[in-house]
Every structure is written in C-alpha cells, then in structure tokens.
Image (cartoon, rainbow, N blue to C red):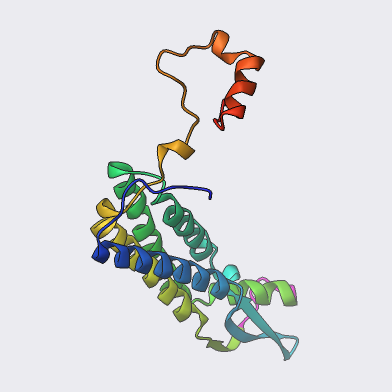
Amino acid sequence: MTGEFSSRPPRASRRALVATLLSGAAGATAVLISAGQTWGEGTASAGGGGLPVAVTGGDVSGLPSALALTGLAALVAVFAVRRAGRVAVASVLALSGAGAIGSALLGARDTAALRDRAAEVTGLADAAVTSVSHTGWPWLSALGGLLLLCAGLLALSHGRHWPAMSGRYERGRRPAGAGSGAGDSPEDMWKALDRGEDPT
C-alpha cells in the first residue's frame, strides 16, 4: 500500500471526489489525444498546381497540451496538500481547463499554421492556401478543457472535505528531541530499519 488517508469524507464529498478524478483524467486525456490529430487541411498553391497540406493540434498551438499536463499534475497534487494549498492547486486545475478551452477555440479556425506548412512544403514564403477545412478535433480538445475546468471547480467546492495523504508517508519521523548526533549513526539506522521505520 503506497499511501494512507487521514480521514473519511462524507458520502456526497466522496462522490464529488470520484467525479473530480474521472473528469480531470478524461479531460486531460481528450486534450492530449486531440493535440496529435489533424485540425486543419488545405491545398498549397505551387507552380500552377496544388499540394495538400495538413496540421495537427500541436502544430496549431502547443498550449492545450501544456495546460492538460499542468492540469493532470494539479489533479494529483490536490490529494497531497491541505487547506490553502489545496485551494491553490484546485485553482490551477480550473485555470488549466479554462486555458485549454480558450486555446482550442482559437485554434479551431486558425489558418496561420496551414500557411506556415504551405511555405515549408513549397519553399515559398507567401504561398497561398486554398480549400481550407477544419476537423472536429479542436472541439474535442475544448470539451476536454471543460472537463478539466469542472474538475477544478469540484475540487474548490468540495476539496476541504477530502482526505489528504498521511504524514506517515511524507517523511520518516524521529522521536522528539532526536538530533543529528548519535541517532544518525549506521547502527541506529539499521535498528530503525529492523523496526520498520524509515531512518531517512
């Protein structure tokens, strides 16, 4: 067992906890998957002909992925901190979701990345892009951001009732008054290990 919770939350708060975990994990996953999919397609004009070009969400903007990873880290950290720290981390989770929504919506109709790709493919800085179309992946990314935002708001509303990781697993505790003298000797460390304590 890798951790222990210090208290048992009320039933309603437990439901909110589960909803937060599921919503946050699903939202981050949706944003990260969407970033690797095609968001826009078009045709680059070159020498009287045309070359197909396409860009992924990562080409359009790296912000949704970065915010999804930030939100995922905040989701985990929510259960490692207490009180004001939990409020701060839950706020980061909510803001990550809001930022992911905004960046996805801005990228849903973006053509700058397509023009950059056209210039790369044709070797012409002012290459025109025609027949531009956009896929639904930016909207799935925005939905993922919405789920992250909901997870953050749930954590802000119910987080004070949720358990936190027990201090037993944060650091091995020494007896009161123990200093850095004889208690740090190799012999004492081995004795602590025999007792099942963490001497570090």
Question: In the figure, residue 123 lies in which quadrant?
Answer: bottom right
Q: Residue at x 67, y 77 (%)?
A: 118
Secondary structure of the magenta portion, mostly?
A: loop
Name the residue nearer the viewer: 56 or 144: 144
Name the residue nearer the viewer: 110 or 87: 87
Residue at the far top in the pictured view: 181
Q: Residue at x 47, y 71 (%)?
A: 26
Return the x and y of residue 102 as percentages of the image width and height: 39, 68
Return the x and y of residue 23 as percentages of the image width and height: 40, 70
Judge whether residue 109 can be spotted in this image: no
Stretch of the chain drawn in magenta: 122-128
Question: In the figure, residue 155 lies in which quadrant?
Answer: bottom left
Q: Can you say whether 21 is above or below 130 in the image?
A: above
Q: Residue at x 42, y 69 (%)?
A: 22
Q: Can you say whether 118 is above or below 88 in the image?
A: below
Q: Residue at x 74, y 77 (%)?
A: 122
Residue 175 magenta: no
Instruction: Assign the C terminus to one quadrant of the image.
Output: top right
